[in-house]
Image (cartoon, coloured by chain):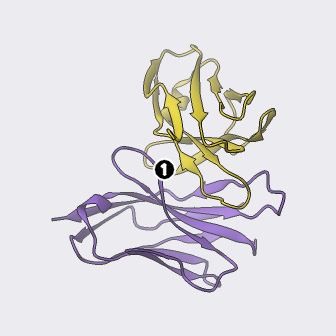
Chain colours: A yellow, B purple
């Protein structure tokens, strides 16, 4: 199993550009999450999904959108990128309500200039 | 809202010695989970240990153990026989138990403690 994979690893965006961060998991997990990690801080939840077709906002959703058309994929869309979105983005997944362990991807480092 | 506080931004320890990382949290919930995650320079987030709030017994995983004090809302991590590979950021995290159907288990993270193990 590859676990949770994220692409790209690094990206530089200009202000106002848009992009999609890709996240795929091959563990058949129902739950998936997007976090951002700012320098010197812990992770903050952007959006999460409890299954295909179901998404909900986390703590810091403004400026982002998500979709979940399949169990495996959970892309994060940035519209009109702003310098405040410069961060490291982590995708995670967990099996169900019982296991509670979240498996993280390697992260995407995004810089908006 | 739940908050997690890690009061030690940085710590260092000599190889083979023991170190304890502190974590306190604030919640009005009675049913929840606590975690320690490790983030090495590779940035990968790795679960180190997990504690269920309803369990009195402290969790242990090989060289890693916790001291869970529910009344004091304290959840410290002890690393015994420290190894160079333990050098990393360590994050304490809280998750409220939403119920049997679940659906919104969300981790709340502290700001982290940077641990350096010196040879």
Circle 1 Cα neighbour tier, 10 Å, few/some/many (<14 / 14–19 / ≥20): some
Q: Which of A87 and B101 is in front in this view?
A: B101
The residue located at (67%, 44%) in the rendering is: A29
Give the quarter of the image for residue A66: top right
Work out whether A27 lies above or below A67: below
* Residue A113 seen in render: no
Work out whether A106 lies above or below A78: below
Quarter of the image for the C terminus of chain A: give it: top left
Residue B95 point in image, percent of width and height: 67, 61
Give the quarter of the image for residue B69: bottom right
The residue located at (66%, 60%) in the rendering is: A99
Residue B17 point in image, percent of width and height: 25, 77
**Does residue A40 appear to the left or right of A5 in the view shown?**
left
**Does residue A38 appear to the left or right of B97 in the view shown?**
left
Helix, strand or loop at mark 1: loop
The residue located at (58%, 14%) in the rendering is: A16
Residue B109 point in image, percent of width and height: 56, 57
**Does residue A71 appear to the left or right of B5 in the view shown?**
right
Work out whether B12 lies above or below A1: below
For disc 1, the chain is A
Q: Which of A26 and A44 is in front in this view?
A: A26
According to the picture, the residue beneath numbered tag 1 turns out to be: A41
The residue located at (60%, 83%) in the rendering is: B72
């Amino acid at each position: 199993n590859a676990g949770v994979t994220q692409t790209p690893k690094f990206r530089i965006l200009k202000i106002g550009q848009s992009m999609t961060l890709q996240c795929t998991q091959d563990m058949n997990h129902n739950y998936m999450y997007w976090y951002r990690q700012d320098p010197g801080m812990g992770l903050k939840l952007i959006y999460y999904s409890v299954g295909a077709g179901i998404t909900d906002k986390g703590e810091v959703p403004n400026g982002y959108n998500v979709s979940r058309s399949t169990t495996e994929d959970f892309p994060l869309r940035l519209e009109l990128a702003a310098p405040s979105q410069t961060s490291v983005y982590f995708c995670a997944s967990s099996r169900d309500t019982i296991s509670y362990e979240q498996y993280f991807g390697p992260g995407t480092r995004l810089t908006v200039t | 809202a739940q908050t997690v506080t890690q009061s030690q931004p940085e710590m260092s320890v000599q190889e083979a010695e023991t170190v304890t990382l502190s974590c306190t949290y604030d919640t009005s919930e009675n049913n929840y989970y606590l975690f320690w995650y490790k983030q090495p320079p590779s940035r990968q987030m790795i679960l180190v240990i997990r504690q269920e709030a309803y369990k009195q017994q402290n969790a242990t995983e090989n060289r890693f153990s916790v001291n869970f004090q529910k009344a004091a809302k304290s959840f410290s991590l002890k690393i015994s026989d420290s190894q160079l590979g333990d050098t990393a950021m360590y994050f304490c995290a809280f998750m409220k138990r939403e119920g049997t159907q679940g659906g919104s288990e969300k981790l709340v993270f502290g700001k982290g403690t940077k641990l350096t193990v010196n040879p």
